[in-house]
Each structure stands twice: as C-alpha cells, then as structure tokens.
Amino acid sequence: MNPQQSASSPADSLRADSLRAGPLHADPLHAEAREVLRRLTGVSDAEFHDGQYEAIRALVADRARTVVVQRTGWGKSAVYFISSLLLRARGMGPALIVSPLLSLMRDQVEAASRAGVRAAMVNSANVTEWDEIRIRLEADELDVLLVGPERLNNLAFREQWLPYLLPRLGLLVIDEAHCISDWGHDFRPDYRRIGSLIKSLPAGVPVLATTATANDRVSRDIAEQLSTDTAAPVHVLRGPLSRESLRLGVLTLPDEAQRIGWLLTHLNSLPGSGIIYTLTVSAAEDTANALRACGYDVLAYTGKTDPDERMAAEQALKENRVKALVATSALGMGFDKPDLGFVVHLGAPSSAVSYYQQIGRAGRGAANADVLLLPGRGDRAIWEYFATSSMPEEEKALQVLAALEQTPEGLSLAALEARVQLRRSTLELLLKVLDVEGAVAKEGSRWCRTSAAWSYDRERYAGVARARVREQESMLEYERTEGCRMVFLARQLDDTSAQPCGRCDRCAGPWYSTQVPEEAQQAARQSFAIVGVPVEPRRMWPTGLDQLMGASAPRGRLSKEEQAKPGYALARLSDMGYGTRLRELFATNELGEPVDSEVPTDLGRACVKVLAAWQWGAAGRPTAVLTLPSPVRPRLAQSLGRGLAAVGRLMDLGQVSLVEEPRFFGGNSAFRCADVLRSYLVPSEALDYVRENRCAVLLVSDLVDSRWANTVVARALREAGAAAVYPFSLAATH
C-alpha cells in the first residue's frame, strides 16, 4: 500500500517497534532514532553525522526550541523527518515545515514519500489539491505538511487552516531560517510572520530553525525570535562550515568577451555537470545562447522561466542530460544534486554569505567539485540596484497609509496603485511589510488601514542597509584575499574552526588556465553583436487613470488603429555586449548627475544594423522620423533621431514638445501614463505632415522604460493618419 494513502502512520509502527524492542543502546532514544534513520535512508548500517542526533534529542526528548547551523548536504531534512516521526510515535500531531521554494518542497515531499513519511505541500502550484490535503490532515493521515512562507501572509490560510492545525501541532520547522532575520541575505517579509506563529504555539511544541548560511549575529537574531514567548533556553547547534569537497578559485578577466570566451574554451574541462550563475536574467539568457551557439548543451533558468520548464531543466541537470544550467539566484535554496561537479559565477553575488549558499549546491555527494568566480566590472552597480529595490521607503509607506485612511472601506490593489506612485511589484512588497507590522490588513480583495499605530523603523532599516554595504565589501575582499578562500568564507559565517583547505588557488596554486584564445573571444563578441531586443506595444490603458485625470481620461483597450507597432531597442541595459557600452553611456558622474553626449559612432552603426534587419510588415518602411525628447539627456536623444534620419534619408519631423517637466520616473503605470499625457505634445507641423503623406513613422528615443511615451505619441500619430508607428530606442531598461 502507498504509505501516503495508508490510514496507518509510520509513526504507529515505530511506536510498536519501540515497545517490542529492548534497549539496544545506552541511550534508548538514540537506538530508536538510528533505526528510523536506517529506514529513511535504506542503508542498514547508516549512522548519524556529527550533531544530527543532538538536534533530534533536543527536539524529541527536551521539546526544545533549536537552531541548527550546518553546511549544505549535512542532512538537516533527516533531522526534522526523523524528529517528526518520533514525535508522532509519542502521540504528537503532524509537523509543519515552512520552506521557501517550490522546488525544495517538491523534492522534500518526494523524499518523504520514498521513506514512508506521509507528506503533502500547500502552495500556489497545487491549489486543486488543497481540499484533498485538508481531508487527509483532518483524518490524521499526514505526518508532515509543507507550506511556503507566503501562506502565512494569506488570510484564508490563517483563518481556515491554522486554527485547526496549531492546537495539534507536533513540530514547527523553519527551513532556510536566515530569512527570518533582518540580517540575513534575503529580505523576505513573508518570513516575518513566523514570529507571530511561534508566539501562538501551544506549550511544549518543539521548534527547529535550520540554515547553512548564518553568522553569529543572524543566529542570535533567530534564537531571540524563537524564544519570544518562553523563558526556556534555545539550543544553538553549530557545526563546521568548511567544505572539503570544494576547490575554490577566482579568475579576474578584463571584460565580458574574455569571461564568456573562457567558458567557451574551458567548459568541457570542468568535471561532470554543474551550474553557471549570473546576476541578471538577461545575462543568463545571453550566456546560454552564446554557449548553445558553440555546441554546448545548456539551458537558461531564471525567475522568468515557466514553472514547468524549470522542473524539466532541474531534472535534465539531475540526470546529466545537460552540461549546465545557466541560472540566476532563482536556482538556489533547495536544489539538490549530490554529484554536482562545478559551480561557476559570471559576476559575484552581493555577499560572501550568499556566495557560500550558492556554491553549496556542489560537492555534496562528490569527492571533488570545482567552484570558480569570474567577477564582472558591473557587479557593484547590480548589487546597489537590488539592495535598494527590496527595502521599504518611509515616504512611500506613508503615502499608502494615507490613501487607505481616506477610504475606510478599503482599496483593491489596482485602485491603490492609482493613488500612489509605485510599481505594482514594489507596492505588493510594501503591503506585505505593512501587513506583517499590523498597519494594514487584507479583507477579501481590498486592503484596509487598521487602527494600529505605525511608525517607520528608521534605525532598523538603516542598520540593514549598513550591513548590506559591509557584506558587499566582504565579497570584494574575498576576490582579493591572499589567504585560504575556504577559511575566508567560513569566517564570514563565524566558523572559527576552519583551517586552510590545501585545495583552493591560494593554498595549492591555480589549477585552471587563464588563456582565452582570440577565436573564443571573437565568438563571444559575435554572440554579443546580435542587436535588437523587442519592445512590445501597450494594448491597454492603465487602471485608475481616470482618478488622476478625470472622466475624460482614456480607458480600456487601445484599438489596433491607435496602437504602435512592435518596436526594438538596440539592447537592454542589463545585457552583456552592447549592454555594457550602454551602461557606460547612461552612467552618472561623481556627483550623481547624468552625462549627456551625442551617440557614439559604434552604437550608431549598431542601431543602423537593427533598422536594416527590421521586417516592416504591410505598412512598409518608415519615411519619417520623430524623436521623443529626453528630459535627462537631450543631446543623446536628439543626435540619435537626426542621425537615423540622415542615414536612412528619412524626413526629420523634429522632436515631440514638452509642455511641462515630467514629474514621475520609475513609478507605476497610472502615474507614468498621466505624466506623459500632460507633458508630451506632438507638434502641429509633424501632425500635418503625417496627414498629408499617410506615411509610416519611426519614433525614436534614447531610453524606453514604461512605454507610455511610445503609446501616447503613437496614438496621436495614428489618429492623424500615420500608416504605422515603429518605436525604436537606444536602450531598454528591461
């Protein structure tokens, strides 16, 4: 019978076995736990790793709250599976495991099922199974329930599941517990709800927090949160974090052509199959394309990858059907391939702690694994972007609260978005933070202001920001260190037991070649030389525009006769190749001011290549150029429009007029669109020319972000009789 479907629990058989068997060990619990370990692993002589039984005893015998900090691959999941079964054998209810990633949950449910542990998961990917899981839970037919931290921020889950689950709970497990801490390397407001969950636990329910990436400060913070409602001491069990199987090295190469060229030359010499990490989605996609073009069997894996495709890619790597996955941090916590042979980073993560966590994917079951870091010139800029984008801002939080206070009945996300100048993703993150802090609550589809007082914890967030700067500096120190690289990483995690590894490029000397043949560099450059990224037209006006501009504001869907055609940008700012040149062009000076200049010759030629390859469609080739003005870099935009008009022998219609200075940059759609509608005016001369000639128009800009300027100006031109409007931009933000 399938153990997941059986009405009898493995815990029942454990209880019976323990009654039949005499004490086989000086510590009866040790003998019982070891027997469970052997059943779970299928290894008849399996023994615990150092520290595993200590953690199990703390949970089962002492019912303690326990923090376990151990290296990846140590066996933290064995601790909580064995503990949950032993507690079930003692009459306790099921375990609740809070796990951060779907891939991790899937692997854990599969592993539990193979071992006879009745496990299920509740997350956004299996909503259709929730009713069945609830029935099994109420029938006491589940030993373990896995949920994502976002479930704890879901009102329905808190109201419909937790009241039933908590009184019966046998064990609470918080996996990847560094996310609880303000000082962890992730900012996950969903995890902060766990503090309230811990406070609501009945007396005597053990709690286990596990992580592989916690220094002393993070460990103390986790322990404090575990002990908020009890005077009982928290057990903190730390093990050595050095990884004997990993061979660490750093290759400092001058530019992206050489970094990609190095991969093109040496990827096959890396052992087995592995992961190539990049810092951005576009870098992952570009690198995968370059490697595939040279015959390597690799797949891209990012936050934009379809969930089913992610699962297929993970399986392909596990079965060694691909040489590598080229991945962002989306492939991180929870992915388990014991024989992973290498991890290469194209660009450094923002902290040594994050780096340790990612390289921990390698060398779990293999004696040797190569870990190589190839830092990039643009690493720091990428760190700063991600560091600031995830942190709540006081001004924005007050705007949200003020908008909700003005509407006591609450506002939907779309309606709230129309009242505050925030992108949808930023607004959702901020609402999560305010929800956790008790300032707002979600009632159905509406967000409401609560009666709780709220103030911005300036000191706390400033401290987090300072910690992140220090973490970034530590990563730069890792790149430059003259000492053992494994010792450096271990000490960043406050493991003072680490000794020189004798394997890294500092201890034993470099084992890798730094030679990059010219033909490989040329192949890399050719992969970068592919110009043109699509810019899709807007087809809908933003929700809430009427609240900003009155009843006359456009709404609903744009007709085909109003829309721009699909357009192009030369490259994304985050791209490799031309993206690197564009980041330099759009950089600011030492005062943080934009530097304005005319389009460099090489970028101008590249733009012409995009236009030459453009398939114009039924409307035909454009015969006129109209330039969108740049409030920030007017020379750059103007020179691009004039240059393309001259090269293509197109009628230069000049620039769109700015009737007032745009106010909103980087906000949400409603504010950005309203800004464009108020500020941009197509000159009458340009409209007259279009009416007379019924021509297609090339709409040129220096940078495309929200696409609302393209949308608004294209509609005006189409209403004047333009056969088509083709947007073209030097750079795209994403």
Image: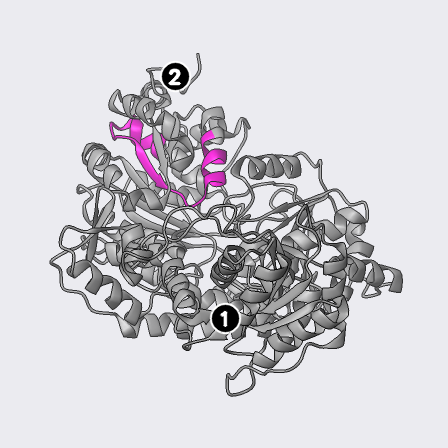
How far is disc 2 from disc 1 in space, using C-alphas?
A: 49 Å
Q: Secondary structure at mark 1?
A: helix
Point out residue 201 in the picture as x, y percentages from the top left corner. 20, 43
Specify whether residue 205 is in view.
Answer: yes
Q: Residue furthest left?
A: 451
Quarter placement of the C terminus: bottom right
Q: Amino acid at mark 2?
A: Gln
Say which residue label 1 marks: 384
Give the label, 2 or 1, closer to the camera: 1
Is residue 407 a member of the stretch shown in magenta?
no
Colour scheme of this structure image?
A: one colour
Apparent side of residue 727 relative to residue 90 in the rendered image (left or right): right
Point out residue 406 in the picture as x, y percentages from the top left corner. 15, 60
The residue sitting at 34% across, 20% down in the picture is 9
Q: Amino acid at mark 1?
A: Glu
Point out residue 40 in the picture as x, y percentages from the top left corner. 48, 28
Query: In the image, which residues are magenta?
Result: 84-109
Q: Secondary structure at mark 2?
A: loop
